[in-house]
Amino acid sequence: MHPVAREDTRSSTSASVDAGSVVDTSNATGSVPLSLDDVEVIAPNLKLRLSGVTSTIVQLVPEQARSLRIATLGPGLPDGLPRIDLRDLPAIWRRPRGRPFRIWHARRNNEMVAGLILRDLLRAPVRVVFTSAGQRRHTRFTRWLLRRMDAVIATSAVSGAFLDVPYTVVRHGVDAEVFHPPSFPGDDYAEAGLPGRYAIGTFGRVRQQKGTDLFVDAMIALLPRFPDWTAVIAGRVTSENVDFAADLKRRIAAAGLTDRIVFLGEVPDIKAWFRRLTLFVAPSRNEGFGLTPLEAMASGVACVTSDAGAYADMIDPDVTGSVVPAGDGVALCSAIEGYLSDVPRAQAHGRIAAEKVRTSFRLADEAAGVRAVYERVWSGVRQPEVLIVARSNRYGLERDAKLLRAALGPERTGYAATRTRGLVSFLLRRRHAHTIMHLERVHAGWISAGSRNLLLPNQERFPRRHIDRLGQIDLVLAKTRHATDIFSALGRPTEYLGFTSYDRQDLSVQKDWTRFLHLAGGSTLKGTEDILDLWRAHPEWPELVVIQKAENLSAAFASNITLLPGYLSDAELRRQQNACGIHLCPSRAEGWGHHLIEGLSVGSVVVTTDGPPMNEMVTPDCGILVPVASSTPRHLGTCYHVDRLALERAIEAVLAKPDTEKAALGVAARRRYEDIAVQFADRVRSIVG
């Protein structure tokens, strides 16, 4: 196999800014044709139009080619890459030298389909690996394809959270030899011939998904007050977005800013444009991974991004840039203004950003991570060690599954919805994993799918009619001491596991010790009516923020209640959790209580029910417990109803406390969260293995 010159595939006279990054092909010396006998990995690109996936292939393959016999296949790729042609495919039935089979590394659905046809229908010696960047619930067809992959790579923990199959997180990287801070005369902004002294830019296809309109709106609002700045927009306008782009240009012209908000189109060398910027903006409404902020950071540019894709993982707020909720034009405008008004701050953050990419987002690290996945496939490791089975309820159970997978290692765990085991698999008693972990209830259809069956129940949702099913469970893992007592009394082997919740702390958000939060979500067991009745009776009380599913809303609200119904972005939910100093959680029943533990994690004062298991997680030294007035059975658990008068007194007592006392409780709450998280991490590894 011939060596590949890395710079040949990256520096271009014909660069295209697209969905995720830059496809850069200058100074190319021609593609490098290979014999298929020499190829152990095929990277297909089965799409004519340039895209972010294309860019990933263009940047990663030359790095991989340093240690792998890899070749690309398909149209739309620049010269300089190792490649095979369709006419070479008949040789795919021969095994590659030194390997039992080739790896077909797919990144799109059609590429997965092609790989499965080669592997399963045509019986070629091929195994299929897929990289998933999407941050959305996959279609049924895509989920079907994913279950048939030999290995799956997720580009971030967020994209991995949408996968039901075992996956390995391998973050995208950037070649810091190609994307680097200004070092040549042509890198100076003055070389662009545009007005002003500083440039702010957004690069990517011009369309609504990329938030180009949000960027334009912000520039129309800000540039008249900052005459030293000029905005540049680089990227293709596809045929379906011609009207969208034309409308943006009309709005710019109406504002008299045509010479200061400039559409560059597809530019010869986008790398130089990155280096000419002082601030980069990525305002995407949704994104897969999103490489352009990393390329900007590597070029020494501070970034303002939405929280779409993996952007929030890239940016350190107020260190390398700012992150705002996706689609929030007001927040975007405010974050940008903070940099336009303080150029030294932007420049300092750009310098830190370049160093972060060099240490944390190296292209070589991405290549090494992908290579490790290939090696596992070549060694024959495919079936997950642990398969987590749960109802797909989009609330606590899916969160439990994600937390368990993170604790056990996503590369060795899988996830299956209860109804997804096929009839043939059930009748043939096919094994899906060594260990099946049942969440909340015993899922009888999955008992034969593993050698060992574990149950992680929620006692308040475990029906008494299912007690007989406990005989099929090898070990019950209890989230709380309360659950340990309940299931031990039923005569089944039970061990206390504990559990954890996501760490929601954000120290950049200022906490208001007079502001209350009640996070009811989609549950009807959070004591919401008790809280609302008290707030309606006390118009003098400060603001209460209620986050609740729209269909569960109470009809009457008071002026001191702020209602946030329906879906909140994760960034906005996290901001509310950190901003509100008091979290009201008078739950009637909990299996675990994520909203309680997340309240502890942000260092707020948590007010909850003095009944198990709520009083097991929140103790008097780190929160406030409200006495119970009555209780009623609920499945194997109990519903505890707080004494409404006692809840009223507790709220009054919190209001009377000085901020210093509340802050001290908050410190204790954070310490309690950290203890819970550490103890769970230790126990899950020792018990589950």
Image (cartoon, grey):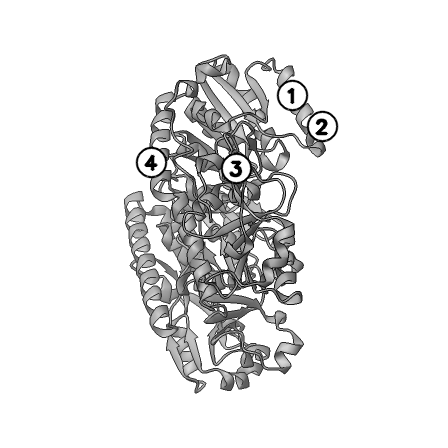
**Which of the two marks, 4 or 1, is nearer to us in this view?**
4
- Residue density around tag 3, few if under 14, some if 14–19, many if 20 or more, within 10 Å: many
Between 658 and 587, the one nearer to me in the picture: 587
Cα–Cα gap, marks 2 and 3: 24 Å
Residue 498 vs 601, above or below: the answer is: below
Residue 531: tell me if it is visible: no
Which of the two labelled residues, at mark 3 and mark 4, occupies the earlier sequence position? 3
Which of the two labelled residues, at mark 2 and mark 4, occupies the earlier sequence position? 2
* Circle 1 residue: 249
* Circle 4 residue: 355
Cα–Cα gap, marks 3 and 4: 20 Å
Which of the two labelled residues, at mark 1 and mark 3, occupies the earlier sequence position? 3
Which of the two labelled residues, at mark 4 and mark 1, occupies the earlier sequence position? 1
Picture coordinates of residue 197 (x, y %)?
Answer: 43, 14
- Residue density around tag 2, few if under 14, some if 14–19, many if 20 or more, within 10 Å: few
- Would residue 543 appear left or right of 213 to someone viewing this image? left
Picture coordinates of residue 151 (x, y %)?
Answer: 51, 61
Picture coordinates of residue 92 (x, y %)?
Answer: 59, 59
Task: Kindly identify the amino acid type of the residue bearing the numbered disc 2.
Answer: Asp
* Circle 3 residue: 21
In what element is the residue under mark 4? helix
- Residue density around tag 1, few if under 14, some if 14–19, many if 20 or more, within 10 Å: some
Residue drawn at x 56%, y 29% as measured from the top left: 14
* Circle 2 residue: 243
Residue drawn at x 35%, y 22% as measured from the top left: 344
In what element is the residue under mark 3? loop
Task: Kindly identify the amino acid type of the residue bearing the numbered disc 4.
Answer: Glu
